[in-house]
Each structure stands twice: as structure tokens, then as C-alpha cells.
Image (cartoon, helix red, strand yellow):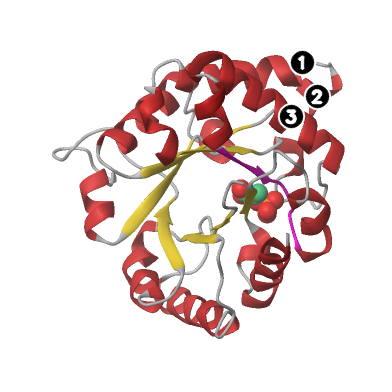
Amino acid sequence: MRTLLIAGNWKMNAGPTEAKELAESMVAAREGKDDSQDLLICPPFISIPAVAEAFSGSNFKVGAQNVSTEDNGAYTGEISTSMLKDAGCEYVIVGHSERREYYHEDDSLVAEKALKVLKDGLKVIVCVGEKLEERKSGNHEKVVKNQVEAVIKQVDKSNADNFVIAYEPVWAIGTGETATPEQAQEMHAFIRGLLSEVWGDDEAEKIRILYGGSMKPGNADELLSQKDVDGGLIGGASLKADSFSGIIDIAESI
Ligand code: PEP
């Protein structure tokens, strides 16, 4: 069985002071719980050191929400993989739908970022997911297939242990609307099939495929119980220690 990954994406919320307090309250909420699933928080870049310090000695890991494809130099406003490692990050999210939508990141840039993250020894969470009109028109599998294949056809299967996919239907992100467990399972199984075609069954079985889109304590059980749902990428509900901890409790009970 794959170890679940419960990952929080704080987006552009929580500067260093607030992030430190929130991270500390998350650690306090898990005290004495002996968690066995993987726990991750991805704060804004500027809050990463504060969160890494608050998490030291705990089961929580720290990640980033984005990264540059460059090593260093004249790239104003960018952050490199080596900076993230220096600050204590282990994971990087790439291709979040908000980056695709507002910052025009396309499949080829997402693939380039994923390759860079893996080459430099970090774990990558590649986000994919269809928009509402794409689901309504029955094109959701085609859209997700293109997004997944753009990355996995370029990544060597030896990276499987460091590779995570997050299926996040765009219509479910921050909307309060969640994919049904059946819709999630169907798409996750489809994605695992794509992985299997390119990397083979053994590697495909290792890859964690997270669900993201309005996951909260009230719906986490039915989503995380699905065979091919290996954790969650959680936005809104990761901004409160009690709700994130509630989702972790559910993950630990599965
Ligand atoms: C996300 O931002 O990845 C996300 C899933 O957000 P929310 O949980 O708020 O829908």
C-alpha cells in the first residue's frame, strides 16, 4: 500500500509571523499522535524558513508552490531549487491551475520545471486537472492525458519515488464543490493507466496520485478511501490547524 501524502497549499496566505504561528499550531495539534502518513505544507516562499523552523523535529515537511527553471543569475523575482533546498524544502508543486491560468504556464514549462526539480534532488508534485467546460463537453480525460503525458514522456521512470501527481479539477478548487468519490477514482485510475503505459506497471503502482479540490474533514474520508486516491492537496482547509489535523486523522485511520 502506498503511504498517503497529506499536503497543504497555503497559496498567497500567511507571511512569516502568521505562518510560524499556524505551523506551530499544526505541530501542537498532532502531538502524541504518532503519524505514519506523509505530511507536507507549502507556504509562500518568504514564509518557508519560519515554517521549516517550526516543523523541526516534527513529522511535517516543507515544500514550495513554484520554482524557477534556472540555477541563479539575472532572473528578477525568481527562486531556484538550490535556494529551496537551503531553506529546508523537500517538495515543489509545479503546474498548479492558478499558475497555468494567471501566469500562463503551459505544459512544456511545467515539464521543464518538473525535470529541474527532480534533477536537483527534490520531490515534485505535478498538478493536472480539467476546467468545468472541458468536463461538461466530455473532454476531461483528453485534457488530463495531454497534461500528464507532457511531463511523464520527458521524465525517466527511475524518478518514480520522487514523483507525485495531484489531480485537481479546476471547477472544484476553492469553490466548495468537490468531485464525487467516483469521479475522483475514475480519473485517478485513468492517470495510473497513463503512467503504466509510459513507465510500466511496477512504477505506476508506486506513484502517489493526490486529489485536490475543496477537500475538508467532512469529505476526506470518502475521497481518501478510494483505491487510487493516495492523499490530498488541500488549499483552504490547510489554513486552519484543526481542519488540516482533522484530515490527517482521517488519513491515519484508512
Ligand atoms: C488547491 O489550491 O490546490 C486546492 C485544492 O484548494 P482548495 O482545497 O481550497 O480547493
Q: Which residue is mark 2?
A: 135
SS assignment at label 2:
helix
Are the two marked residues, 1 and 2, in contact with CB atoms closer than 8 angstroms?
yes
Image position, residue 246 (x, y; %) = 71, 71
Report which quarter residue 188 is drawn in: top right
Closer to the N terminus: mark 3 or mark 1? 1
Q: Residue at x 41, y 61 (%)?
A: 62
Would you place residue 244 above or below residue 54 in this image? above
Residue 80 can be seen in this image: no
Q: CA distance from mark 2 to mark 3?
A: 11 Å
Residue 203 magenta? no
SS assignment at label 1:
loop
Q: Which residue is mark 1?
A: 139
Amino acid type of disc 3?
Met
Q: Residue at x 55, y 65 (%)?
A: 36
Q: CA distance from mark 3 to mark 1?
A: 12 Å
Amino acid type of disc 2?
Arg
Which mark is nearer the camera, 2 or 3?
Answer: 3
Would you place residue 139 above or below residue 76 in this image? above
The label on residue 209 is none
Would you place residue 157 above or below residue 35 in this image? above
Q: Which residue is mark 3?
A: 187
The magenta segment: 208-216
Whether residue 111 sits left or right of residue 183 in the image: it is left
